Image (cartoon, grey):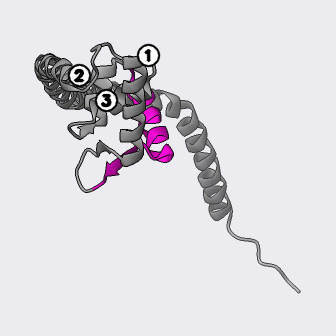
Amino acid sequence: MLVEIPDPEVILGVILAFIIGIVGLYAYFKIRPFVKIKSEVFDASQTERLEYYERQLIDMKIRLDALEIQGIEQKIEDPNLDLKQFLEKLAKNEVQERPIEQKTKVEEEPEKVISTPNPVNLPPTNPVDYVLQLITNKAMTSRDIQITLKKSREHTSRLMKKMFEDGYVQRNTESKPYTYSITEKGMTKVGKLEENQIVG
């Protein structure tokens, strides 16, 4: 088989084209860093501007969050302040009203004690006897008894419960607060107490 050899001009053209291509690639890679630096300078200025705006946005976001948090705290504090002021007013009103109620009740109670059929007019040392004498003429609430006895609410509640269980007093559950009145057994005990005081 015979192979035709191309003309020397064609071979030279191909070799020249190959060499030009290699030189072009070499030149491209040599020039490319400089071109890249110019584009990077351009990109760097753009990047700096973007970073600047990003920092500004972050700063504004932080300030906005801080303002929102302060607004929420103020909103939370305001109802608490109003509630505290309201409770303080209520407490002041109760303090102002209670002493008046206590004074009037305390002033009324000695009259009840005086009006009881206790000839000596001295309160008995036993609180059960004393309460029975108090409620001989009129039913009383546990609060009234507490004020007269000058004992704690818990002490008075225990005392009235024991007296109710022992059958000395009866509890009226139809009224709020409950009122206590003396029973026949309680009247008998008061009668015995008066006899002992007369004899004594």
Q: Which mark is residue 113?
A: 2
Q: Which one is in front, 193 or 80?
A: 193
Distance between mark 1 and mark 2 Cα atoms: 14 Å
Q: Which residue is drawn at 55% across and 36% down?
A: 27
The residue pinned by badge 3 equals 133
Please give the name of the residue rendered at 37% of the width and 32% of the height, measured from the top-left corner: 190
Q: Name the quadrant of the N terminus.
A: bottom right
Percent across and percent down for residue 43 are 37, 31
Question: Which is nearer the eye, 184 or 37?
Answer: 184
**Label 3 near label 2: C-beta < 8 Å?**
yes
Marked residue nearer the N-terminal end (1 or 2): 2
Q: Magenta span covers which residues?
A: 151-173
Q: Does the magenta stretch include residue 152?
A: yes
Q: Residues within 10 Å of mark 3 (few under 14, many from 20)?
A: many
Residue position for label 1: 125
Question: Could you tell me which secondary element the residue under label 3 belongs to?
Answer: helix
Dominant SS in magenta = helix
Count up the numbered dots: 3
The earlier-in-sequence mark between 2 and 3 is: 2
Q: Percent position (x, y) of residue 54?
A: 31, 30
- Where does residue 16 sit, x and y in percent of width and height? 61, 51
User: Is residue 189 part of the magenta span, yes or no?
Assistant: no
**Which residue is more in the foreground, 128 or 61?**
128
